[in-house]
Image: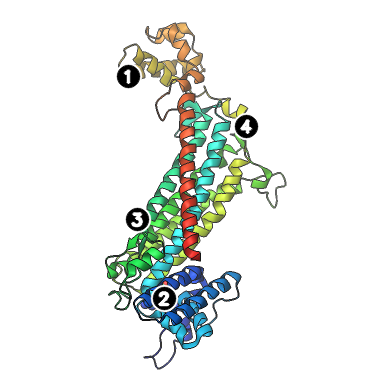
Amino acid sequence: MALWGGRFATGPDESVAKLSRSVHFDWRLAPYDIRVNIAHVAGLKRAGYLSEGDAAKITAALKELSVEVLTGDFTYNDSDEDVHSAIERGLIEKLGELGGAFRAGRSRNDLVVTDFKLYLIDHLLQISLEVAQLAQVIDDAAKAQIDLLAPGFTHLQHAQPILFSHELAKHSHALLRDLDRLKDWQSRNSISPIGAGALAGSALVPNPEITAAELGFGGVARNSIDVVSDRDFVAEALFDLAMIAVHLSRIGEEFTIWNTQEFGWVTLDDAFSTGSSIMPQKKNPDIAELARGKAGRLIGNLTAMMTTLKGLAFAYNRDLQEDKEPVFDSIEQLLVLIPAVRGMIATATFNRDRISSQIETGHSLATEVADFLVRSGTPFATAHEISGRAVALAQSLDCDVHELSDEQLATVHPSLTGELRASLSAKAAVESRTSISGTSTKSVTTQLAQLDEKIRTFTAYIDGEQKRFSGMMSA
Ligand code: ARG
C-alpha cells in the first residue's frame, strides 16, 4: 500500500516501485514501528485529536498486529512500499478508515528515524552482550595460563619475554573499549525525533516529551530539521561495529599464525576448524580467517554511510533510505561471527611447551643487560650501546646474549659483572616488569581481576538496559 497518491494521475512505473521499495529490508523495523505508533496514538489522544474509544481501538489493533508480525501471520506484500506503509495497511485491514487516523501529526521522516533508533538501541545491546561474553572467555583463557612464559614480539620479531596470559588479555582490553563506545552511543543517541514531523515540527502533538519518555528515550530533539536529516547515530554505530570487527580481525590473524605448523602454539578444536575438499589431511583455521575477512565488509558499510551523508542537502532526502542495509548487515554479521570466535577460543588448546620453548632466543634478554647497567648508574644511551655490543659478540659466537659467560660479558664492558646473571632469564625479565600495565605475574593478576570486574559491571548494565527495553516494548 502506498501512503500517498491523491495528487498523482497514475501510480508509479514498475521500475520506480522496484527502486523505491525498501520493505524487504526495513521490515526488520516492524516491531519498533508498531511500538512508536502505539506511543503516538497515546499522544494524539492526550492532545484531543483521537477520542478515548478510537485510541483504544487503534491501540488494541496495533498490539494484535505486533503479535501477528512476531508469529509471521502478518507480513508485507507486493504492494507495500516500506515497513510504515505495510503496518498502516495491516491496521486499515483491521479497522477500515479509522486505521488511517493514527498518522496525523507525524511523518515517515520522523517515524523512520525513531524506529531505527529503537532498532539500534535493541541490537547494540545484543552486540554488547556478545562482546562482553567474548571478553570473558579470553579473560578466563588468560587466567588458565597465568604461569606460562612466552616470547613477546614487535615487528613479528622476538622482542622481550612476557606472560602468555598478558598476550591473551590484551584482546579483552580492546573489547572493553568497544563496550565503552557502545554504552557511550546509547547515552548520546537516546533522543526522540517524534514531534519533528516532516521537517518543521508537528502542529498536532504538543507534548512529544511524554511520547519520548514512554519510548524510553532520555530526551527530545531540539531542531526538527536536524533530527530528520541527522544520521550521525548511524555512522557512529557503524564505526563502533567496524572497530569491533577490526579487533576480531586482529584476533583472527593472531590465531591463524599461532595455528601454523611453524608456530604450533595453538590447536583448534575440530568443531571450530574446517577441512579441505581436495587435501584430506587439512584442518584449516577458517573461523579465524573469516574473523579477519569480515572487517573489510564492516569498514565498507561505514564508508558507504559516510559517503551517502557527505554534502547531502537538508532535511530529509531519499538518499537517507540507504542508511539501513549497511547497519543490518554489520549487526547480522557480528551476531554470527562473535559466537564462533568465542567458541574457537574457549575450545582451543594452547601448546604450552611450544609457546615457552623459545622465550630466550633472538637475544630477547638484551634489554635486561641495558636495564642492569642503568640500575648501576650508566645513562641509558650508553647502556644500550654496551648491550648492543654484547649482542654483536653473541652473534659472532653463534649464541644468544644470555649464553655469554661472565668472562665474555666482562670483555664487552667492565660494568657487566657476575651480578648481571640473576637478571638474565626470561622469568626474571618478566617478573621485573611490575608497572601497572606490565607483564609481571603480580601486575597481570591484578589486571585480570580488574578485567573480570569491568566485564561484570558491563554485563549488569547491559542486562538492566535489556530489561528496561523489553519492558518498554511490551508496555
Ligand atoms: N522508507 C523511507 C526511508 O527509509 C521512509 C521515509 C520516507 N520519507 C519520504 N519522505 N519519502 O527513508
Which is more foreground, mark 4 or mark 2? 2
Q: Which residue is mark 2?
A: 41
Which is more foreground, mark 2 or mark 1? 2
Q: Secondary structure at mark 2?
A: helix
Point out residue 356 in the picture as x, y percentages from the top left corner: 57, 26
Marks 2,1: beta carbons within 8 A: no
Q: Residues within 10 Å of mark 4 (few under 14, many from 20)?
A: some
Residue at the spot x=37%, y=59% of the render? 190
Marks 1,4: beta carbons within 8 A: no
Mark on residue 188? 3
Q: Residues within 10 Å of mark 2 (few under 14, many from 20)?
A: many
Alpha carbon separation for disc pair 1 and 4: 37 Å
Quarter of the picture for ligand 1? bottom left
Q: What amino acid is found at the position of numbered circle 2 in the picture? A: Val
Whether residue 279 is visible to the viewer of this picture, yes or no, is yes
176 is higher (above) or lower (below) than 86: above
* Of pointers 1 and 3, the one earlier in the residue sequence: 3
Which is more foreground, mark 1 or mark 3? 3
* Of pointers 2 and 1, the one earlier in the residue sequence: 2
Q: What amino acid is found at the position of numbered circle 3 in the picture? A: Arg
Alpha carbon separation for disc pair 1 and 3: 47 Å
Q: Is residue 460 left or right of residue 279?
A: left
Q: Which residue is mark 1?
A: 380
Q: What amino acid is found at the position of numbered circle 1 in the picture? A: Phe
Q: Which residue is mark 4?
A: 351
Q: What amino acid is found at the position of numbered circle 4 in the picture? A: Asn
Residue at the spot x=46%, y=45% of the render? 458
